[in-house]
Image: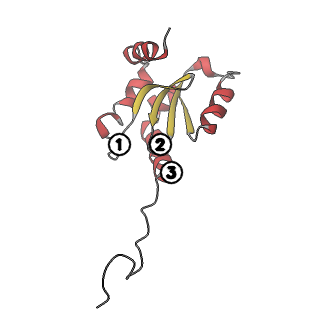
Amino acid sequence: MESRTFAKQLRRTMTDAEHRLWKHPRAHRLDGQTFRRQQPIGPYIVDFAHFGARVIVEADGSQHAESPTDPIRDAWLTEQGFVVLRFWNDEILLHTDAVLESIWRALHARAPSPPAPLPQGERGEQPH
């Protein structure tokens, strides 16, 4: 199945943990940040992606316990400049605030710094 078609299907069949997590970042509700859900990136579909900060959030169920492919996937995404945050579904459902705090910290740790202002005289201003 083509990845965009499969991503649409995944958006329609999100898990309870994905629903719980998605209600916070959707519509810029998490500190005004923009996330996309079930987003194709290269050969993978990630649960949630913030492209500005290059942060990916994964909600993992039991199928991910000792998964041999997750480390390969994470390594590829890291090579592309992303940081991957993984949370177990029960962690999302039982400790939502702590999960959101971790996501918020990752976003702000990766946010670009505003540029430093130019020294006076280099801004096109005349000294007084």
N-terminal-most mark, 3 or 2 = 2
Q: Say which residue appears at 57% left-offset and 22% top-offset.
A: 43
Q: Disc 1 versus disc 2: distance between alpha carbons?
A: 9 Å
- Taking depth in this image into account, of 45 and 12 the one nearest to the observer is 45
Circle 1: residue type? Leu
Quadrant containing the C terminus in the rendered view: bottom left
Q: Residues within 10 Å of mark 1 (few under 14, many from 20)?
A: some
SS label for mark 1: loop
Give the image location of residue 11, x and y in percent. Answer: 39, 18
Q: Is residue 21 visible?
A: no
Circle 3: residue type? Arg
Q: Is residue 21 left or right of residue 44?
A: left
Q: Is residue 59 above or below residue 31?
A: above
Residue marked by disc 3:
110
Q: Say which residue appears at 46% left-offset and 36% top-offset.
A: 95
Q: Residues within 10 Å of mark 3 (few under 14, many from 20)?
A: some
Q: Say which residue appears at 44% left-offset and 69% top-offset.
A: 116
SS label for mark 3: helix
- Taking depth in this image into account, of 112 and 125 the one nearest to the observer is 125
Q: Disc 3 versus disc 2: distance between alpha carbons?
A: 11 Å
Q: Say which residue appears at 59% left-offset and 37% top-offset.
A: 80
Residue marked by disc 2:
103
* Residue 77 placement: quadrant: top right
Cβ atoms under marks 1 and 2 closer than 8 Å: yes
Q: Which mark is residue 30?
A: 1
Q: Is residue 96 left or right of residue 60?
A: left
